[in-house]
Amino acid sequence: MKAVNPYLNFNGQAEEAFKFYQSVFGGELEIIRYNEMEDTMGATDEDLKLVANAALSLTGDIKLFGSDILDSFEQDHKRGNDFYINLETESEEETERLFKKLSDGGEVEMPLENTGSAEKFGEVKDQFGIRWMVYYQGTAAI
């Protein structure tokens, strides 16, 4: 496995939160909005201005990731769905293996698929209610 990183969800406050975290930890901050993406993933109206992905480099390969939860996705921000553990894998095979094992007895929230910024990406809630993102970038553009 390449890296394990926290992924935080916000209700329209991702940019503000990540600028705060940058003031605390330092590091390089990258923010991508839904309207800047080739595939807006169905975001509409005001949601297009929100943060699709924020990445704050902390140290070495450790990053803090996050985004805004969208009304147009019918997502509901509440305690318990405000974070994921993001597993960045080194191969498609590792991605598929970890995703399958984590979803055993759990619930697939987003099946593994090519998202444009990842060759394989999926979300799963394991049998204990812990939410995971399994991510293999491969040759996909960020």
Image (cartoon, rainbow, N blue to C red):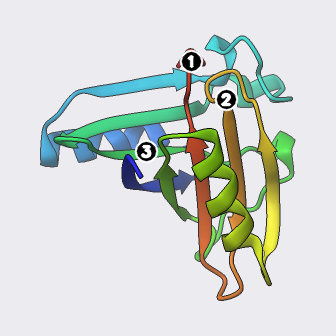
The residue sitting at 58% across, 44% down in the picture is 135
Residue 88 lies left or right of residue 55; in this view the side is: right
Disc 3 on helix, strand or loop?
strand
Please say whether residue 13 is visible from this viewpoint. no
Q: Residue lying furthest front in this view?
A: 93
Q: Residue lying furthest bottom in this view?
A: 128
- Image position, residue 104 (x, y; %): 77, 78
- Image position, residue 59 (x, y; %): 15, 43
Inter-mark Cα distance, 3 to 1: 20 Å
Mark 1 neighbour density, 10 Å: few (under 14) some (14–19) many (20 or more): few
The three-letter code of the residue at mark 3 reads: Phe
- Image position, residue 97 (x, y; %): 66, 59
The three-letter code of the residue at mark 2 reads: Glu
CB within 8 Å, label 2 to label 1: yes
CB within 8 Å, label 3 to label 2: no
Q: Earlier in the sequence, mark 3 or mark 2?
A: 3
User: Which dot marks residue 65?
Assistant: 3
Please say whether residue 44 is visible from this viewpoint. yes
- Mark 1, residue position: 139
The residue sitting at 38% across, 54% down in the picture is 5
Vertical side of 122 occupied by 98: above or below: below
The residue sitting at 26% across, 44% down in the picture is 20
Q: Nearer the viewer, mark 3 or mark 1?
A: 1
The residue sitting at 68% across, 42% down in the picture is 121
- Mark 2, residue position: 119
Inter-mark Cα distance, 3 to 2: 18 Å
Q: Earlier in the sequence, mark 3 or mark 1?
A: 3
Vertical side of 67 occupied by 99: above or below: below
- Image position, residue 36 (x, y; %): 62, 12
Disc 1 on helix, strand or loop?
loop
